[in-house]
């Protein structure tokens, strides 16, 4: 009945009546996402009628009401089949100011029309394969980039930027060709990076150093939405560059070659270095050696390097562990990122080792018991999800410089057995990667407890059938094999 009444007014009424009836329809169906199949034909005809109104010279308020209803109806894929035409796509693109002209966005009264048109295009492109093909033919991605350039430095039109970015994300998600076009032809990387910098109000003081205003206001909801959409689009644009496939801001870093991730840390300035020296001077002499990591002006500093970005990633990882669900989607990307950073960059590894595996003092409780980051990661080493337990074990193994004895010290043999078996290291040794040698960090508590800890030792069968430590058993079999190879 609603569609029938609206269709009658749209076909025969004047602009004021059309605006009123469509506003009523929009208010009633704003939260409707499932539609009755019995009224499908009426909704199709209503869509067609709305497009006919949109090409007429009607007031802006009437255009907005038309677009709001069209956005609601475009949630129904079946309705879109007859109305998704090149002509109708061009109507929406014109209303959204998606052109190749250099005309600036001056008429504030047109902004609601632009936003609603972009919303309609998002729904239509997402729900219609025909619209996805037409977007290529109409060069929609290039026109979206052109609109972004017009509004990138104007914060009062964040809604336009947000839905422009969302549509750009959808196009780059659905078409690999558009990802390549954005990356090379349309210069999408610098454009999207500038959008992010604008959202975060970033001011660069050097090539890799930005001025941080710790007292600045938090991002508004609109700025947050823009940043999220820009990150999603950036991920799509970069995802094929190095053949890595994951999600969100952490996952965007996963697309960056690991050799380039040293930009996440940077040396302190002369002023900051002087401040760090003062901070260390204020520590008691017996604590200075253990305080390589200090908090300076709300910034995490380690060995003269700003580690704030790595610290944020570490906190993010712990929050994902505490969430207790969706580990494969939410936790493994950040764990993988931190693992590769640690493997490639010594300062990052040493900082993370300092935070995750500090000198061992609690030698009475099992490694998986407790609330520290180490305890949480050790519990994950026996998780039911194979991918989760593998990456958790790999992260700790890398922090231990892939030394079996060091890993066992922090995790226990039972928790580490899966990783060691997979790597053929049950008898001890170390992994294939080379790491610098550090000084022994064993605490007095651990040194005193170490002789009492060999309650569980890997065992094996000797050739005569008796049980012996695994390493000794393997050595005896090696001797037998060598002897056999010398005989005819």
Image (cartoon, helix red, strand yellow):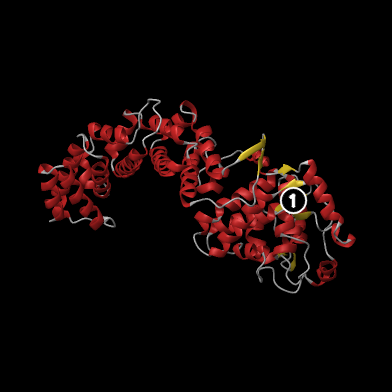
The location of residue 310, given as percent across then percent down, is: 66, 50
Q: Is residue 300 above or below residue 373?
A: above
Q: Residue at x 52, y 43 (%)?
A: 199
Left or right: 42, with 33 as reference point? left
Q: Residue at x 24, y 39 (%)?
A: 59
Taking the image as drawn, is residue 107 in sight? yes
Where on the picture, by quarter, is residue 83? top left
Relative to the observer, which residue lies in front, 403 or 13? 13
Specify the quadrant that holds the N terminus: bottom left
Taking the image as drawn, is residue 462 in sight? no
Relative to the observer, which residue lies in front, 365 or 87? 87
Relative to the observer, which residue lies in front, 389 or 170? 170
Name the residue beneath numbered marker 1: 301
The location of residue 469, given as percent across then percent down, is: 76, 65
Secondary structure of the residue carrying numbered label 1: strand
The location of residue 275, given as percent across then percent down, is: 80, 49
Left or right: 84, with 449 as reference point? left
Relative to the observer, which residue lies in front, 48 or 318? 48
């Amino acid at each position: 009945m609603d569609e029938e009444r609206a269709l009658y007014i749209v076909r025969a009424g004047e602009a004021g009546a059309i605006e009123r009836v469509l506003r009523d329809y929009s208010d009633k169906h704003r939260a409707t996402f499932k539609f009755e199949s019995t009224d499908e034909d009426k909704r199709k005809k209503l869509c067609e009628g709305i497009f006919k109104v949109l090409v007429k010279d009607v007031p802006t308020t009437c255009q907005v009401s038309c677009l709001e209803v069209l956005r609601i109806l475009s949630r129904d894929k079946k309705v879109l089949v007859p109305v998704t035409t090149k002509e109708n796509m061009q109507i929406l693109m014109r209303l959204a100011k998606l052109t190749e002209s250099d005309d600036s966005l001056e008429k504030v009264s047109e902004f609601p029309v632009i936003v609603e048109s972009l919303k309609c295009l998002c729904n239509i492109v997402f729900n219609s394969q025909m619209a996805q093909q037409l977007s290529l033919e109409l060069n929609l991605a290039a026109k979206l980039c052109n609109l972004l350039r017009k509004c990138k430095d104007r914060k009062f039109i964040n809604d336009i930027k947000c839905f422009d970015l969302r549509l750009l994300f959808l196009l780059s998600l659905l078409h690999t060709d558009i990802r390549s076009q954005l990356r090379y032809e349309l210069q999408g990387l610098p454009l999207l990076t500038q959008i992010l910098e604008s959202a975060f109000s970033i001011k660069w003081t050097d090539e890799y150093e930005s001025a941080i205003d710790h007292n600045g206001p938090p991002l508004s909801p609109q700025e947050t939405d823009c940043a999220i959409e820009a990150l999603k689009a950036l991920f799509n644009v970069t995802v094929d560059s190095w053949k890595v496939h994951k999600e969100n801001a952490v996952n965007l870093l996963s697309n960056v070659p690991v050799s380039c991730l040293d930009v996440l840390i940077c040396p302190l300035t002369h002023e900051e270095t002087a401040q760090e020296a003062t901070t260390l001077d204020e520590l008691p002499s017996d604590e200075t050696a253990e305080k390589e990591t200090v908090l300076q002006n709300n910034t995490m500093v380690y060995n003269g390097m700003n580690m704030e970005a790595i610290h944020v990633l570490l906190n993010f990882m712990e929050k994902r562990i505490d969430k207790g669900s969706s580990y494969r989607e939410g936790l493994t990307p950040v764990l993988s990122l931190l693992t590769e950073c640690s493997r490639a960059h010594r300062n990052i590894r040493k900082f993370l080792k300092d935070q995750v595996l500090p000198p061992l003092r609690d030698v009475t409780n099992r490694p998986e018991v407790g609330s520290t980051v180490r305890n949480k990661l050790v519990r994950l080493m026996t998780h039911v999800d194979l991918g989760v337990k593998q990456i958790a074990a790999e992260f700790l193994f890398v922090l231990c410089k892939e030394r079996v004895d060091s890993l066992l010290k922090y995790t226990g043999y039972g928790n580490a057995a899966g990783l060691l078996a997979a790597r053929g290291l049950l008898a001890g040794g170390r992994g294939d990667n080379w790491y610098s040698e550090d000084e022994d960090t064993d605490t007095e508590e651990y040194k005193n407890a170490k002789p009492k800890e060999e309650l569980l030792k890997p065992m094996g069968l000797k050739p005569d059938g008796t049980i012996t430590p695994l390493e000794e058993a393997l050595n005896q079999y090696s001797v037998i094999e060598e002897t056999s190879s010398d005989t005819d």
